[in-house]
Image (cartoon, helix red, strand yellow):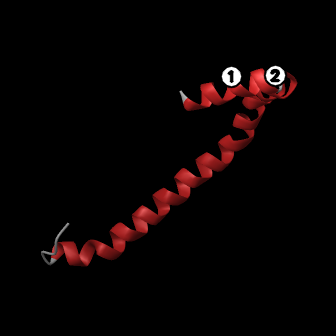
Amino acid sequence: MMGLLLWIILLIVCWPLALLALALYPLVWLLCLPFRLLGIAVEGVFELLRAIVMLPARLLGGRP
């Protein structure tokens, strides 16, 4: 909601820049998509490593 409000303010103040931002948003989203997927994969690897390291403590009755 806040993003829409800021875009409307930008449209009122500088409409060419607002239209350019509106046109480039899908392109920027597509360029950021691989980095998001990479971040999800790296986070998954770190969670797996954490689970492997914490496994002995969990087997010995440590807190979860």
In the rendered view, would you say 43 is above or below 8?
below
- Residue 51, quarter of the rendered image: bottom left
Sequence-wise first label, 2 or 1: 1
Q: Nearer the viewer, mark 2 or mark 1?
A: 1
| Label 2: element kind | helix
Q: Residue flagged by tag 2: what amino acid is it?
A: Leu
Around disc 2, counting alpha carbons within 10 Å, would you say few (fewer than 14), some (14 to 19), or many (20 or more)?
some
Can you name the residue that lies furthest to the left here?
A: 61
Q: CA distance from mark 2 to mark 1?
A: 11 Å
Asked which secondary structure carries label 1, the reply is: helix
Q: Nearer the viewer, residue 19 or 8?
A: 8
Rendered location of residue 29, percent (x, y): 70, 35
Against 35, residue 28 (above or below) is: above
Number of residues whose C-alpha sits closer than 10 Å to that of mark 1, classed few (under 14), some (14–19) or many (20 or more): some
Q: Is residue 60 or residue 8 the one in the foreground? A: 8
**Image point (66%, 41%), residue name:** 33
Q: What residue appears at the point 61 percent right and 25 percent down from the top-left corner?
A: 4
Q: Which residue is mark 2?
A: 19
Q: Which residue is mark 1?
A: 8
Where residue 40 appears, as percent x and y from the top left, is: 53, 51
Residue 63 screen position, x and y as percent: 16, 71
Residue 22's image quarter?
top right
Taking depth in this image into account, of 25 and 11 the one nearest to the observer is: 11
Q: Amino acid at mark 1?
A: Ile
Can residue 17 be seen by looking at this rendering?
A: yes
55 on left or right of 47: left
Q: Are marks 2 and 1 in contact (CB under 8 Å)?
A: no
Residue 22 shows up from this direction: no
Q: Quadrant of the C terminus?
A: bottom left
Relative side of 27 to 42, left or right: right
How many numbered circles are shown?
2
